[in-house]
Amino acid sequence: MNQHGIDRARRRFIQASALTGAGLILAGCNSQADNATPVNNDSAAPPGNQPAPDTWQPPKGEGPSGLTYGALLCGGRLVHAETGEERFIFTQLNIDRTIQDRNPHQKEIMDIGFLAHGVIKNPFAEERVLVFEKKGPGAAEIDLKANAIATRIEPAKGCEFYGHGAYSADGRLIYATEYEKSSYEGKMTIRDARNFSVIDEFPTYGEWPHDCQFIENGKVVAITNGGGNIDGGAQPCVTFVDVEKGELIEKITFDNAQINAGHLMLSSRLDLAVTHAMREGLDNRQALGAISLRPAGAAFKTMISPASVTSAMKGETLSLCMHEEKKIVAATNPYGAPGGLVTFWNYETGEFVDKLEIEQPRGIGLSLDRKHWVLTFGAARPGVILLSTETHKPSDPAIVFEASSQGSHAYIHDYFAA
């Protein structure tokens, strides 16, 4: 199905746009951000990297909502066509109800104050998630049931967030990638999950740390360090760090000096996939992004063939999603040639599998039933389309609908409050 066919399917599936006119008005949402409780990270905190175990109790939250497809969570930015005013929204969209009702079933917080990049679910409370800004001071805990910011979280002193984080395996700690504003050196800050106060940190062994994934039962963390400007900046890399000791285990650098380290994903057997954007100082629309793969026990390689595909991966290679049963990893290039590109790779063999050309694809996730890729796309009018994980193509008829935002990632959650 080409872009014209997707546009026609979207119009047939849903006639009404989620956006009204040229302004910022979206239906059915109110911001409650001003009522959020700020957290001061300069306050005294217990030493070490653990909160006091005798006082810690996991929060009592709600369970999953019994969804088949899931709820899409993402941040977005709205710009007023006439005034240029920006607002940063957070969207939760019930895919099951949207398909059932043939109308977007979504909730928005209309202005959270920053562009939410990474979304991290609370392991004990489905209705709570954390969101982080990429290159900025913004972070917050969001109450999905109340559709409001519960607590704003400040970066460590002298630092800014870089978009991602994670809970510890036992839920007691929160980790976040941050960097020193003066030097760009990366650190993983450690917070008490009860009150978000900083209690410890360790280095990421690179500059501009971005994505992270904890492996080996939380004992090791893999981190992408984006690196600096192509003219003399720090070298991009992927590092593996011992969480308890804060010591470097492994550092992976790249043969191609023109790409940075963006997002990463590891399978359960530790197959590694990494997306790349162009280094700072290069054209962010025409310079090439890339994807690199390291099958478990094999060498790390940046994909260069087929050349007709890799040469079309222009701009940032943005979002990643793995389907372990299929051994497939999907990656998006919003500005890939000719107008946007999604590629699919076998992450165990490194072989190219398929591609889809679609307008500005951004976030990609996996439906809860694992039968569909959930892809956000579109420029002026954000949309969501479901692709078969068997064919990597839209179904016939296509399941495609409007959304209030598309975000950098498509987080699929198992909770949506009625």
Image (cartoon, helix red, strand yellow):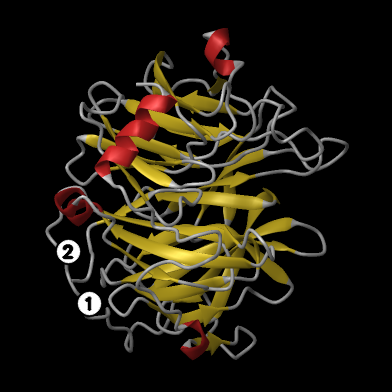
Q: Quadrant of residue 356?
A: top left
Give the x, y percent position of residue 139: 54, 71
For label 2, the crowd category at 10 Å Cα-Cα, with few meaning under 14, some 14 to 19 and many 20 or more, is some
The answer to whether residue 60 is left or right of residue 192 is left
The answer to whether residue 106 is left or right of residue 23 is left
The amino acid type, in three-letter code, at marker 1 is Gly
- Find disc 1 in the rendering and name its residue: 61
- Quadrant for the N terminus, please: top left
- Find disc 2 in the rendering and name its residue: 64
Residue at left offset 66%, top offset 27%: 254
> Where 38 falls versus 28 (above or below)?
below
The answer to whether residue 371 is left or right of residue 287 is left
Under tag 1, what secondary structure? loop
Under tag 2, what secondary structure? loop
Give the x, y percent position of residue 159: 70, 69
Residue at left offset 15%, top offset 55%: 67
Res 177 seen here: no
Looking at this view, is 44 or 130 the one in front?
Answer: 130
- Quadrant for the C terminus, please: bottom left
The amino acid type, in three-letter code, at marker 2 is Pro
Looking at this view, is 56 or 162 the one in front?
Answer: 162
Looking at this view, is 105 or 207 the one in front?
Answer: 105
The answer to whether residue 263 is left or right of residue 260 is left
Residue at left offset 48%, top offset 87%: 36
Give the x, y percent position of residue 135: 67, 59
Looking at this view, is 270 or 285 the one in front?
Answer: 285
Cα separation, mark 1 vs mark 2, equals 10 Å
